[in-house]
Every structure is written in C-alpha cells, then in structure tokens.
Amino acid sequence: MAESNDPILYEKRDDRVAVITINRPQAMNALTREMYFTLEDLWGNIAKDDEVSVVVLTGAGDRAFCAGADLKAMAQGTQGSGHPIQKSGPRLMDDWEIPFWKPIVSAVNGYALGQGMSLVMATDIRIAADTAQFGMTQIKWAIASGTGTQILPRFLPYPIGMEMLLTGNNITAQRAYEIGLINQVVPAADLMDAAISMAKIVAANSPIAVQTAKESAITGLHFNVEDAIKWGYKLERMNGATEDAQEGPRAFTDKRPPVWKGR
C-alpha cells in the first residue's frame, strides 16, 4: 500500500480481499466526523463491488487499532451536538439495520477502545496481536455508548459485558480470547499475515453463499429459534437456486476446484 496522509486507506487486492486501514497513528487512529462519513461511503461502495468478497479492517502503526471517537474534536463542538456516531456513524456498526453482508476480518494491532471496540464487535472474525487491549472507555468521560450497551450484554456473558461497560477498564488480548470476544491471538509481527490468510480462506468460497450465510446468521438473531430456523431454510432455498450452488456439487463430483460466478 502506497504511503498516504489520507485518514482512511483502501487497498483492493487481486485475491478478492480488500484492506481498510484507519490511518491516524499520531492520534491513535481516533475517528473524526469526516472519517465516519468516509467509512460510510466506503462500506457502501464495497457492498456493490463484485470483485471484493472479504474485507480486512485494521489500524495504522503498532499502538492502536482505533482509540474511538476523537474526544478532542468532540470537546470543541457545541454542547448537545451529540456524538459523531449518532449523526454519521459508519454503517458497519449497525449492520443489522443497514446491511453489509460481506464478511469482515478485524486485525487488531493495539488499543481498541470505545467506538474502536464497537468496530471490532461489528466484524465477523477477529484476530488480535498479543499486545492488543480492548475497552469500553466512554463511561470514564460521561458517555454511555449507544452501540456497546446493546451489543456487549448480548454477545458476551452478561456480567463480563456489564463490567466492561460500567468500569471502562481495559482487558488484554488473552482475556478477550478467553471470553470469546476474539478468535485468535498472534504475535504482533504476524498479525496482518494471519488476518489476510483467514480472509483468503473465506474468499475462496462462493461469494453469494458466504454473503447468504452472514445475512442468515445476523438477521436470524432477531427471531425466536423456531422462526430463525424457518428463516434459515428460506435463505438456504434461495441460495440453492443460484448457479454457484449448482457448481459446488458438480466440482465435488468431478474432483476439481469449483469456479464461482457469484450468481
């Protein structure tokens, strides 16, 4: 990736994997309102790009993945203007309301704090450097996270999620792994290789089947178990009518790699 001063960097590789890098290392990759707008537009463009199957999300430098919203910028705003996420948050953070069905692998290279941790929670597969730390630190600055208060009690054991929300204390990468917040802990030097490797494994599958699986899983969380299974079967049938779903069994029978068309 070429050197750039842009706060959000985007690289589209030739293996159906794209990389988004939050690029404000001098500010621990804290997010400004303008960066939220940029991310919002970028997610929309990637969703329509048939050449990208999987996204890797990371931060520049080795200190921080994302330290959250830029509190200095917030402090300069008018009282009551609200947190930037309320006005223009990256659509990724609410992907069950504004769909983004392409899988996202987060490569957490340092501090993931506040909205930075919310970004991690909005990704599908999470790999962290052994130096990474995670925390919902907003409470220390009298901010109650609209995203974190809803996600953590649902997707972590309730007392652990509430402890993170109410204390604002950080946890280590190893602790994050132990509670199921992340998938892997790797040496910092191996982080991007591990994340790209995982993304390539996912990208080798049918793009339409992968997106269907993510959509089915996330939207099914809103249903009771009986309705969720009915929903899963509905999407399974829809996927079964695609060309890729016909190609998969043929390739298996012919003992050859499948050729996906994404339709």
Image (cartoon, rainbow, N blue to C red):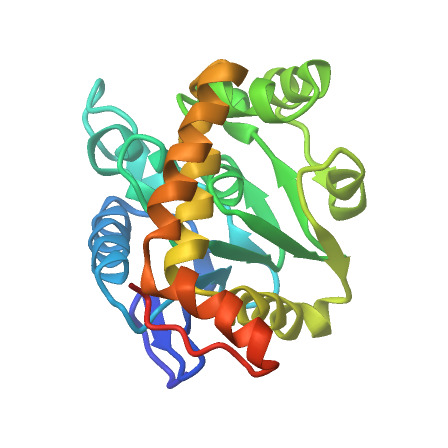
Residue 132 image point, x, y percent:
68, 52
Where's the N terminus, which quadrant?
bottom left
Where's the C terminus, which quadrant?
bottom left
The residue at the point 53 percent across, 47 percent down is: 124
In front of the other: 145 or 161: 161
The residue at the point 36 percent across, 76 percent down is: 11
Residue 70 image point, x, y percent:
37, 42
56 horizontally vs 32: left or right: right
The residue at the point 32 percent across, 58 percent down is: 242
Q: Quadrant of residue 90?
A: top left
62 horizontally vs 5: left or right: right
Q: Quadrant of residue 140?
A: top right
Q: Is residue 171 above or below residue 192?
A: above
Residue 103 image point, x, y percent:
45, 54
Q: Is residue 169 above or below residue 118?
A: above
In front of the other: 3 or 95: 95
